[in-house]
Image: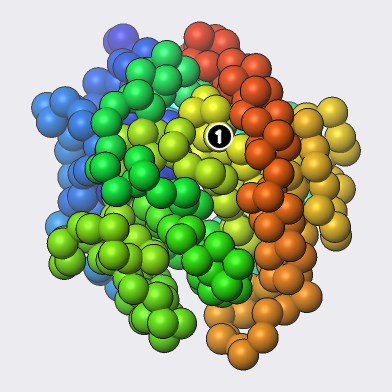
Amino acid sequence: MEMSLYFLINSLAGGGAEAVLVRIAKYLKPKKIFLLEREVKYTIDESLISFLSNHTGDTNSIFKTFYIPVYGAKFSKKIESNDLVISFLERANFVNVISKYIRSHKAIVSVQTDPISGHIRINKVLIKILYNKADFIITVSQGVANSLEALGVQKSKIRVIYNPIFLKEIIEKSKEDIEDIFERRDFLITVGRLTKAKGQWHLLRIFKELKREFPELKLLLLGEGELKRFLVNLSLEFGFRTYVWNKDKLSENYDVYFMGFKDNPFKYITRAKLFVLPSLWEGFGNVLVETLACGTAIVASDCRSGPREILAPDTEITYQTKVPEFAKFGILMPILESNLKNTETLTEKESIWLETIKILLKNESLIKDYQGKALERAKDFDISKIIENWYRVIQDVS
């Protein structure tokens, strides 16, 4: 019987892993894409989509975690023993392997985030137990691979495949028109889900101080997530005129713009003065590669894992800087604190970020230097180079 290929993921509600699935689906051509939750925001052939529940992003996350065995039982009825399932994101990965106990299919799990940073103890235990039952574990960076090994996952099963981009498509989309108000103003931008991992509250705190010296500067936040209300309220508390998507009328009269999920973030990124990534942890940092493709200068946290591999590829990946590091393809910064508590004054690390961003905003030649080198690095992650690694893994497992 011929082997069928299926994809499995939590949802397609927006995010880096979801974008990667949509990209590689065009090449690997899965027979079906199964979603644990009923949310789709990416443009994709609807006939490929199949839902395993009526859950959404608003469904209690603890409930969805305990529901994993039920997802697994349901999913095992959808596939055959000779099929191959590639899963993305932790819950979907657990479902894939649990289903393997029932159906004995081939299972590849793609690990998109660092399994040590920000994970609760029970998840680390499940990773060690379940991931070793998979046929292969694909990690999006060497840093993630190292973390999995530290948790007891077999090194022989791990393959590192960087997340790909469609370089030509990003370049073309970056040329599309944006609202006039953003054409006429300098702005900083960050793109990512509004979650604790992304650390956007630090950026709001830093921006509050930046406005004292750069009163006309704007801040754009693209993405949705569970911290939306907290971040919007924090922005208002700081006295920012705050735009919120699907609520306010867009105009130039705001300081901070919560833009929501954008199918084409690139047209905003390419026009930004700086892209700022204050993440507490990453798996890879897809948006950094996309930003390089847009030719925009980057200031990014030197967190686990991915940013250093992308922006400073010739350095030791386990090193984490404590001072601003003007690396080859972007500026790496000390990791910020995970505490959401708002304090009156900036922390020492936030102050370092503030001064570094000021230096860049006052030094156009330095920004242009990073802009000039960005595309060179982005080419290393084009789909034409990355997809061959996926073909190889599928061939090996089948």
Instruction: Evaluate whether residue 321 shows in this view.
Output: yes
- Rendered view: 358 above or below 51: below
> How many callouts does the rendering have?
1
| Residue with the mark numbered 1 | 296
At a point 55% along the width and 34% down the height, the residue shown is 296
- Rendered view: 276 above or below 122: above
- The quarter of the picture where the N terminus appears is top left
Front residue (pair 381, 241):
241
Residue farthest left in this picture = 47
Front residue (pair 393, 388):
388
Residue type highlighted by circle 1: Thr
Q: How is the image coloured?
A: rainbow
Front residue (pair 350, 28):
350
Judge left or right: residue 349 versus residue 377. right
Judge left or right: residue 257 versus residue 328. left
- Rendered view: 246 above or below 191: below
Judge left or right: residue 205 versus residue 256. right
Disc 1 element: loop
Label 1 neighbourhood size at 10 Å, few (<14), some (14-19), many (20+)?
Answer: many
Front residue (pair 120, 26):
26
Instruction: Evaluate whether residue 353 shows in this view.
Output: no
| Picture coordinates of residue 192, whole percent (x, y) | 44, 51
At a point 49% along the width and 28% down the height, the residue shown is 294
- Rendered view: 326 above or below 104: below
| Picture coordinates of residue 345, whole percent (x, y) | 67, 86
At a point 56% along the width and 80% down the height, the residue shown is 340
| Picture coordinates of residue 341, whole percent (x, y) | 57, 86
| Picture coordinates of residue 338, whole percent (x, y) | 63, 73
